[in-house]
Image: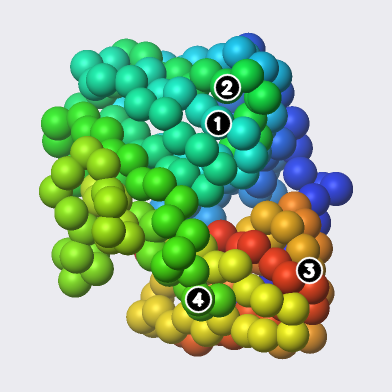
Amino acid sequence: MITIRHAASLGTAHDGGQDLRCHFAFADYADPAHGHEGRLRAVNTGTLPAGGTYRIGPEAAVDIVTWVVKGALATDMEGFAPDALGAGGLHLASTGSGCAQLAWRAGGQGAGFIQFWFLSDTQGTTPAQEMRPALPELEDGGFRILASGFPEDDPEEAQRVSDGAPVTLSARARLLHAAIPAGEGAAYGTAPGRVLYLLVVSGAARIDTVALHAGDAAAISGQTDITVMADEAAVVLLADVAV
């Protein structure tokens, strides 16, 4: 089954001094029809002006993955050294037993970002932070794993990934990225009993006959294999989570 969430139908939440466009209920945005998708708690997009900051906390038992759409972000996670990310870079805040404060500050050109919140499968773990740069030289038009809670995906045990390996989630989930040339497709297969959530960041794509444009998303259940075709050159993010 494929359920479409068009960009125009998203809600708006006001959180940490920031206006967010939300796929699921979040902060002061209430949406009984869209509470979450399996163990995927939230998908939020935001834009910060030059020097603007998005600050949240406290948070616990959730993995917050921030992917930079444009511009640059500097991270500020309690107990960890700050770091900086450019477009296509990723920051993982694994809040574990609790993190009092998290913040992301835009650079001089501002920043756009997308956050995926994954519910942790283990409780009481030590908070952790990891980074992953864009690594555009590794893009081949197919899906690449950015973040994973599966040991077989070979995540590095380091605070900054440099060789293309995914950052380590505490949730049994994956976040994947594909930059698909026009007229080509990217395929992905998962196990039964999983839910896939596909977000089109830019361009236009389709799954079977279902057309998606920038900002649209599709929740896919009861289906283990998908192929995303690009009607226009497209950048997509795909979350694979337990029901």
Mark pair 2, 1: CA separation:
6 Å
Mark pair 4, 1: CA separation:
24 Å
Element type at mark 1: strand
The residue depicted at 22 percent of the width and 17 percent of the height is 79
Mark pair 3, 1: CA separation:
25 Å
Q: Earlier in the sequence, mark 4 or mark 2?
A: 2
Q: Is residue 170 left or right of residue 118?
A: left
Q: Badge 1 local density, few (<14 within 10 Å), some, or many (20+)?
A: many
Mark pair 2, 3: CA separation:
27 Å
What residue does disc 4 label?
A: 140
The answer to whether residue 110 is above or below residue 142 is above
Q: What residue type is labelled 3?
A: Ala
The answer to whether residue 180 is above or below residue 133 is below
Q: Is residue 16 left or right of residue 60?
A: right
Q: Which of the 4 image quarters holds residue 123?
A: top left
Q: What residue type is labelled 4?
A: Asp
The residue depicted at 32 percent of the width and 60 percent of the height is 164
x and y, in percent, of residue 7 in the image: 79, 51
Q: Does residue 8 appear in this view?
A: yes
What residue does disc 3 label?
A: 204
Q: Which amino acid does label 1 sit on?
A: Ala
Q: Which residue is farthest front? A: 137
Q: Badge 2 local density, few (<14 within 10 Å), some, or many (20+)?
A: many
Element type at mark 4: loop
